[in-house]
Image: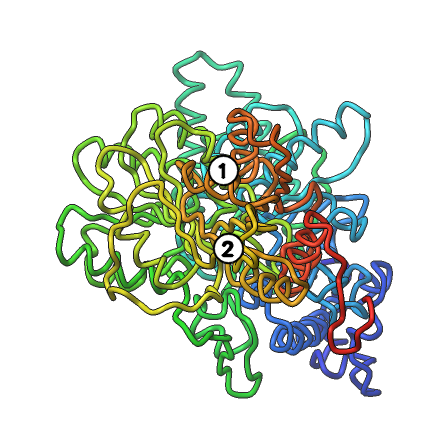
Amino acid sequence: MEKLAPENEINTADNNNQFRKIGVPLIDVVDSMDKLRALNPLELPWLADDIRKEIINVVSQNGGHLGPSLGVVELTIALHYVFNTPDDKIIWDVGHQSYAHKILTGRYKQFKTLRKKGGLSGFTKRSESEFDPFGAGHSSTSISAGLGMAAARDIKGEDRNIICVIGDGSMSAGMAFEAMNNAGDMNSKLIVILNDNDMSISPPVGALSTHLSKIISSKPYMSIRNTASEIASFLPKAFGNVAKRTESHARGLVTGGTLFEELGFFYVGPIDGHTFEDMIPVFENIRDNKKNKAFLIHVRTQKGHGYNPAEKSPTAFHGVYKFDVLTGELKNVKGEMPSCTQGFSKIINHLAEQDDKVAAITAAMPSGTGLSKFEESYPDRFFDVGIAEQHAVTFAAGMAAEGIKPFVAIYSSFLQRAYDQIVHDVVLQNLPVRFMIDRAGMVGEDGVTHHGLYDISLLANLHNIVLMAPSSYNEVLNMVRTAYSIDDAPSAVRYPKGCLAYIEPITNEFGEVLPIGKGRMIKSAALQNNPRKADVAILSLGSRLFDALQAAEMLEQDAVSVSVADARFAKPFDKELVAELAMSHRALITVEEGAYGGFGADVSQFLSEEGFLDTGLKFRCLAIKDDFIHHAPVAEQLVKAGLDAESIRNTALTLAKVERVNFASGQNA
């Protein structure tokens, strides 16, 4: 490394660090790329320590993705140290490991606002910084995006590096390999950093491997290898093929890169992702290589590196709410009732005990979807397919075609990645796959990339499918049980993150089968002087029932007669119930925690077709407006979306045209 001082001039990193001598943390000094690149490489570990402490402290208060970000601190520093960012572009796959990147790229003073309303996003975001060339929140997109940027660079005749940082788990998605297959066939320089933190590809082979990585990425080796390829092209075909195979297989045996070489990548690694002396020379060699070629640098890291509790429990500390820095004790918030995820877990384990045809499938989220206990109890019927939602759905379709009863548990925002498979492989064949859609609705601090707002719109327009949305924990139990009972059609249950606010007695601890497509009245309007029609009916789907009932209480104080119903089913919805509400009320409001074009749109279409809107019925659909709602507490997101109790009340007042009165003061509000 050119910046390393001669050995006789160096004692220890501490003595070499001028800022440490005067008690100034490097993180307070390095506020630009120029200052970062002016550091001696022996100072970089101190900077890594400062950044790691800042990440731990902020995440302990704000929550966030701790393990992934701690694991790439040194890697992040090395990349920015070597490459000319932001002109050179670093694309972080998923983006949940970008905290050190944010701190280094001018956002250190804002970092305490991470995941807070109006603060920094927990993921990369193009509008946040010029150092974020591509927004992310879902996995396996970086190589495709990077290759597109590389192609754009070549078209414009520019000279810059495009670096994609992708985790080993994200490599299980087909999209990553589609992009790699394309990249290997293009004559364009692209650098892919494989962040391997789980030995899922191959373990490091010690100092020899690191030494070989430095050698094979160097200019002399590259020249020799390219020369050998050129010589082979002039040899008779048999001799040339033997020469190429011998060189390729020799490198594959030494470095473990045969797969990537076959895809057309020049493979380097594995190297230690926590040692600057290993990373910097390799990055410099690749940076300075002008060949139009795809490179893959295999970097080994440790998830949660540098914080003992996260190292010991990488899964628990992958994404956390809050925790005690000193003890590592997690402070996850729990409601009075069990979460929806726990309700699903309880029922599917009970069903599996009763029926050996029940199987569970998830896409790299066994803990998040509540399937960890199922995995322990029924390992032969549990399938974690990796980050491969498309495969998960069609895999389940194949099982259902053979008489197995598969439950596919996937977050709403991830299930949308498999929409074609739901349509083509499940619904068109009317296969009884059961989708358990977790994190449906607002998800709070994770923000726009993880909101589950589109599943109603996407699924309710499909033929045959049964789509349910529980309003309480009791309804979660009932609806999972109902999905199990449906053997002649696909079905889905969508439920939010955490607990549901509406509290009702548990009728059966293992759930009861509901009549398909039937809603229920929760509160009937108290009619005075026996008028022909009540003022307003509120028809809630799923999680908004509690707020609908709160709104009803306030409306009664406003002298508005109001009924509240629980739709239960988005598809097929209860047309008889809707017709009854339309005939007995002057106005009807639907409320759903999803995007426009879902349940309310279907109800509106029905009212129009049946002529109810021609009779003077006033109708409003309360759903997520045509806008993105950024990270904030869920309660605040619901206010912004107009789905809280006060917003429902105001909509009802407008429809009923009843003046809002403050009874306590006798004054108009």
Is 641 on the left-hand or right-hand side of 572?
right
Q: In which quarter of the image is residue 341?
A: bottom left
Q: Considering depth in this image, is 595 or 187 the residue closer to the camera?
A: 595
- Name above or below for residue 362 compared with residue 459: below
Which residue is at 39% across, 36% downward?
A: 572
Say which quadrant the N terminus sits in.
bottom right
Image location (x, y in percent) of residue 214: 58, 51
Q: Residue at position x 66%, y 44% from top?
A: 163
Q: Where is residue 483 in the image (x, y as percent from the top left)?
A: 29, 46
Gap between marks 2 and 1 measured at Cα: 35 Å
Counting every numbered tag in the picture gives: 2
Q: Mark 2 points at which residue?
A: 564
Q: In this view, does 29 lie to the left or right of 104?
A: right
Q: How crowded is mark 1: few (under 14 residues within 10 Å), some or many (20 or more)?
A: some
Pick the front one: 418 or 146? 418
Q: What element carries label 2?
A: strand
Direction from residue 3 to residue 279 in the image, left or right = left
Q: Quadrant of residue 342?
A: bottom left
Q: Which amino acid does label 2 sit on?
A: Val
Badge 1 element: helix
User: Which color scheme did the rendering employ for the protein?
Assistant: rainbow
Residue 575: give x, y in percent of width and height.
43, 36
Instruction: Report the disc number at residue 417.
Output: 1
Residue count near mark 2 (Cα–Cα under 10 Å), binned few <14, some 14–19, many ≥20:
many
Quarter of image, res 141: top right
